[in-house]
Image: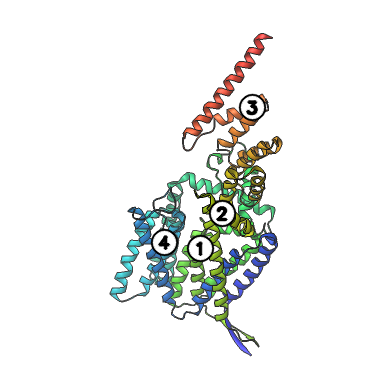
Amino acid sequence: MQKVNCNILDFLLLCYSLMAGFNFYFTHQNRLCLFEVAKWSTFLLCYIVARKISHKERILWGIIFLGMVEGIIAIFQKTHWLNSVHHDFNVTGTFSNPGPLGGFMGATITIILGLYLTKKCFIPKWALFTIFILFCFILLLADSRAGFLSTLFGMVTLCCLFKKMKVESFVLIKSVSLFLFMILFIISIYYYKKDSADGRLLIWRVSIDMIADAPLVGHGIGTFENKYMYYQAQYFESHPYSKYEKLADNIVYPYNEFLRIGVEQGIIGIIFILCIIASIFKYTSKEKYNKVYLGGFVSLLTFSMFSYPFNVLLLWLLGSLLLGGIQYQKNIYALTKYKFQSSWIIIVCLVLSIKGGHDYYNLKLNVRKLYSESLQKRKVAEAYIERCQVCLQSTPHLLDVYAQYSFLQLPATKSLLILKQASTIIPSSELYCDLGDVYKEQKQIDKAMECYILAKNMLPNRLLPKYKLFCLYREQRDSIKMYKIGQEALLTEIKITSTKALRIKKEIKRSLSQRCDKIWQCALEK
């Protein structure tokens, strides 16, 4: 008999993985792909490696090293020595926008402070303090409110874990002052970018409607981006004058991982996650580095309440390393007649991760080639994507790019199939406008009208769906609906003034004026 050493977290993660695996399989039977398997394999790989490393401090220094790499890249981007990943932001690190950079910096700053509190020698403390100041500067460059909050809660957690009890009255005053400071900080963060914060309140409000429709087991893993925009359209259809109309946008993340779990896995998934979190705080050993891990975990947990860290690879792996590095007070020993070798699991996970990463890179490369100036490259890319339809459906952001390309370049019959497929996986207002145009080209007016109306309800603050409806009503000579949607379009506030928007409004005014002149002339003749 062989003895296998595990802990309560291993057991809970195994149970959750089995539940999530069944959920994912029954939700995506027709489009199972290696990418999701590779994602979880990478998580398991990092978790096992972190569990196997006996010197837990090394993992923390490894995380700090990654933070230094991100910080150097961010500084180079700020000084324009490197290009930012996002065209609207100067500083993003290797991430798609500054938000995840702020979250990673918040967790890393917390870890640096924790290591500082564990050290007694002057030189390590001086080095950690220098790195701490540098990372705080990077956090300010990222300008991420979720990053600020994660840093605050992570540091407060460390202070509570490392504090030494003194006079009770002094401790009470300090605790009350700290609580009031945190409340004021959260309020100031809300008003710092109020419109953005209210936009997230809209997302959370609609997400609660989604949970209410499937409260027990959820809609299925990976279905949030498939269904959210339809729920948002229903919300604005039933609340036509909502204060959130101006803040609506195309959404693929709920900006709260607990809400995502509730939407996709229901109450059962939330209970599993809460049990995992509770076990971490209840059964973690009192070893000093465990306090650092707990601080980093709280920081990442706080960030997950206001962002989407588990859709960002580096933050996903950071969570795995933090969970794997935590040591428990008691371990569970299971007896089995089979020889258990964790090295085989590591090898399998490594192979799956490399294979998934390689396939994703090739798919992304070919999607980019669709916009190449070379006709031959475009044809090769189209042929490759045709062969990888299942993989493409498992990467909604790449499918969205391919759908846009099909609308611009491919024949209407083929474009229609691709757009309809994309509408079931990553629906958006723009996609339904394109789908309506294709239906209109094929003389399917009723379906085109349905697409335009749905696009308008998804984003009531957008001018384009209203303009397309206006043109359709004008062609159908429906004066009443044309006038109504025309007035609605003219009253739409434009976030960013452009020549196209101004031209659209000018055309609507001219058409309405001409139609009114004709009606008035006919009345005079009668």
Residue placed under numbered mark 4 in the picture:
105
Q: Residue at x 56, y 39 (%)?
A: 245
Q: Residue at x 58, y 23 (%)?
A: 511
Apparent side of residue 136 relative to residue 3 in the rendered image (left or right): left
Could you say where residue 247 lies in the image, as x and y percent from the top left?
53, 42
The nearer-to-camera label among 1 and 2 is: 2
For the residue carrying disc 4, how many other residues have a C-alpha within 10 Å: few (<14), some (14-19), or many (20+)?
Answer: many
Residue placed under numbered mark 1 in the picture:
313
Secondary structure state at the residue bearing disc 1: helix
Q: Earlier in the sequence, mark 4 or mark 2?
A: 4
For the residue carrying disc 1, how many other residues have a C-alpha within 10 Å: few (<14), some (14-19), or many (20+)?
Answer: some
Quadrant of the snapshot with the C terminus: top right
Checking the image for residue 398, the label placed there is: 2
Residues at marks 1 and 4 touching, judged by CB atoms closer than 8 Å: no
Q: Earlier in the sequence, mark 2 or mark 3?
A: 2
The nearer-to-camera label among 4 and 2 is: 2
Residue 49 visible (yes or no): yes
Q: CA distance from mark 2 to mark 3?
A: 35 Å
Secondary structure state at the residue bearing disc 4: helix
Q: Earlier in the sequence, mark 1 or mark 4?
A: 4
Q: Disc 1 marks which amino acid?
A: Leu
Q: CA distance from mark 1 to mark 4?
A: 15 Å
Could you say where residue 125 lies in the image, as x and y percent from the top left?
31, 71
Q: CA distance from mark 4 to mark 2?
A: 28 Å
Along the line of sight, which residue is nearer the eye, 454 or 361?
361
Residues at marks 4 and 3 touching, judged by CB atoms closer than 8 Å: no
Residue placed under numbered mark 3 in the picture:
474
Residue 26 occupies which quadrant of the picture?
bottom right
Q: How is the image coloured?
A: rainbow
Q: Earlier in the sequence, mark 4 or mark 3?
A: 4
Apparent side of residue 455 relative to residue 286 in the rendered image (left or right): right
